[in-house]
Amino acid sequence: MANLTQLRMLENLDGILLVDKPAGIAFPSVVKTVKRKFNLVKVGHGGSLDAAASGLLVLLINDANKFVGDVMGADRVYEGVMRLGLATNTHDAQGEAVGGSAPDCGWRDPSFSSRMAEVLPEFRGDIFQTESRWCSVRREGSAAYEIADTGEHKPFLSHVYRFDTGEPGEDGRLAFSVSSTKGLIVRTLVNDFGAALGCGAALESLRRVSVGKFKIDDAIPFDRLLETEMKDFFPCVIPLGAGLR
């Protein structure tokens, strides 16, 4: 329970809180929980993150929300794993398999690395994406993912600075990393990459590791934040001057 002095400090607390969101939690739940737990006046965010994804969530506290455009517009870096040989309606592993899947697409063949090397440059630089109308969501209080119809989407332009992969595992899992401008739909990038390879690919896991100057190494794990007492919360917030310098 906050005392009167702490409440007054919270009213004047302006800054940035970096949270390491675990997979399986919808990001609005993180925002609401932080606001409620620490009696904050206003908490916004610098970019959404799918429930199935983990990683950096930039929270903007009180007057920091005036700079939401600066954070929203920052570049992003992700690390993830895709599953080769699987195409789904949501472009991720939570969706239903659709035509385009090819479980025996030959990733065990030594020539597959050459195929990837030929295809990868097509997914760097300016690329057009069309997000799937189907999206896997996990609603607050629900233990399972639901498939939601978000309607048809128009193609839009994204820019990928870097898109690199490792070597496929025996089970078809392929680690990758991508650096891009805001707005990139990583699961759609994975889907389109799999289509170009001729075998299909679905996003299995994703972790955001940076947003602009903010890094995941400086973020507080959400479960630890839940255990943080009010008196220990203030040092967790990056002052506006330091956060936006």
Image (tube, grey):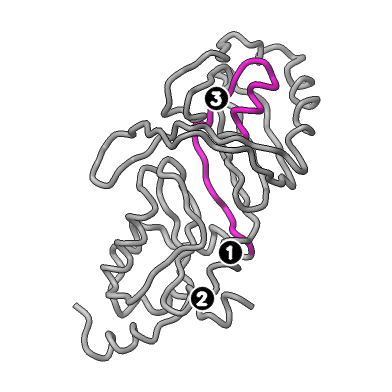
Q: State yes or no: residue 195 in magenta.
A: yes
The residue that disc 1 covers is 214
Point out residue 52 in the picture as x, y percentages from the top left corner: 42, 40
x, y percentage for residue 108?
A: 66, 13
- Quadrant assignment for the C terminus: bottom right
Q: CA distance from mark 2 to mark 3?
A: 40 Å
Q: Amino acid at mark 2?
A: Lys
Residue shown at the point (42%, 66%) measured from the top left: 44
Pick whichever, 28 or 78, lies toward us: 28
Indicate yes or no whether the magenta region holds residue 69: no
**Residue at left offset 29%, top offset 34%:** 144
- 2 or 3: mark nearer the eye: 2
Q: Is residue 12 above or below residue 108?
A: below
Image height check: is 24 above or below 112? below
Q: Secondary structure at mark 2?
A: helix
- Distance in Å between CA atoms under marks 3 and 1: 29 Å
The reply, left or right, for residue 225 in relation to residue 101 is left
Give the numbered dot on residue 140.
Answer: none
Q: Position of residue 79 (x, y in %)?
A: 59, 43
Element at label 3: strand
- Camera-side residue of 101 and 174: 101
Q: Looking at the image, tell me whether mark 2 or mark 3 is earlier in sequence order.
A: 2
Given the image, on which type of amino acid does mark 3 rest?
Arg
Residue annotated with mark 2: 66
- The residue at the point 39 percent across, 69 percent down is 43
Q: Which residues are magenta?
A: 189-212
Q: Secondary structure at mark 1?
A: strand
The residue carrying mark 3 is: 83
